[in-house]
Image (tube, rainbow, N blue to C red):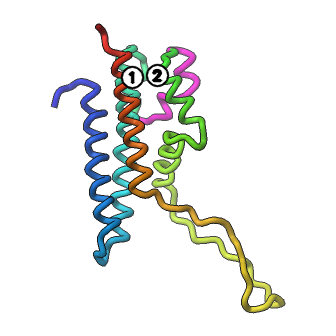
Amino acid sequence: MAHELYTRTNQKLFFAGLALESLRKAEAGEAMNAQALVQAEREAVLFHLYGAVLGLCHEVAGYYKLAEAGAPRLDLLLNQAVLQTSPTPELAELMEIAQQPESWLARLLDAYSALFQPPQAPKTAKVDPALPLITAVSVGEEPVPLGHGELESWRQQLKQLVLRYRESLSEC
């Protein structure tokens, strides 16, 4: 493999595509361990998409020769301190996208960080002996797990961003 920064981004996008294909097959499958396969592939897609965004940030930081070019996590590159010391339009745009809660990047970062949270028991209503035995209780919405379509959409948006950044960063 060449030792160019863009190769890591390309590799992570490719790996995310492979994991997405496996996720699609797992979602359609009826294997006894289908639920485990779906969760494993979903986590693999998130891992590789996060790595691809980090790889893109490494490309940008390397192009501008930023001191943070080797940062191992996105939060070390996408923060106000880095933008103040070395303003770059690409990192500023990525940070702006990440700060919009409904954007694909913000959702990707939230989903990725959720991978490192311990499991939590579902919330249940307190039982009062004076209440009737059967009651309708709403304890909050269950989060809908990420599906193949949404993850593929994030991958496509990231690929478009990569291509656009590479066009602007190329030296003619």
Residue 2: quarter of image = top left
Above or below: residue 156 compared with residue 80: below
What quarter of the picture does the C terminus occupy? top left
**Which mark is on residue 165?**
1
Above or below: residue 152 compared with residue 60: below
Instruction: Give the residue displayed 35% in from the left and 32% down from the top.
Output: 55
72 to the left or right of 92 = left
Instruction: Give the residue displayed 52% in from the left and 21% down from the top.
Output: 82
Q: What residue is shown with label 2?
A: 90
Above or below: residue 55 compared with residue 50: above
Amino acid beneath label 1: Tyr
CB-based contact (under 8 Å), mark 1 and mark 2? yes
Residue 14: quarter of image = top left
84 magenta-colored: yes
Magenta extent: 73-86
Q: Main secondary structure of the magenta part?
A: helix
> Where residue 102 sits: x, y (%)?
58, 43
Hey, which residue is sitting farthest left in the picture? 1
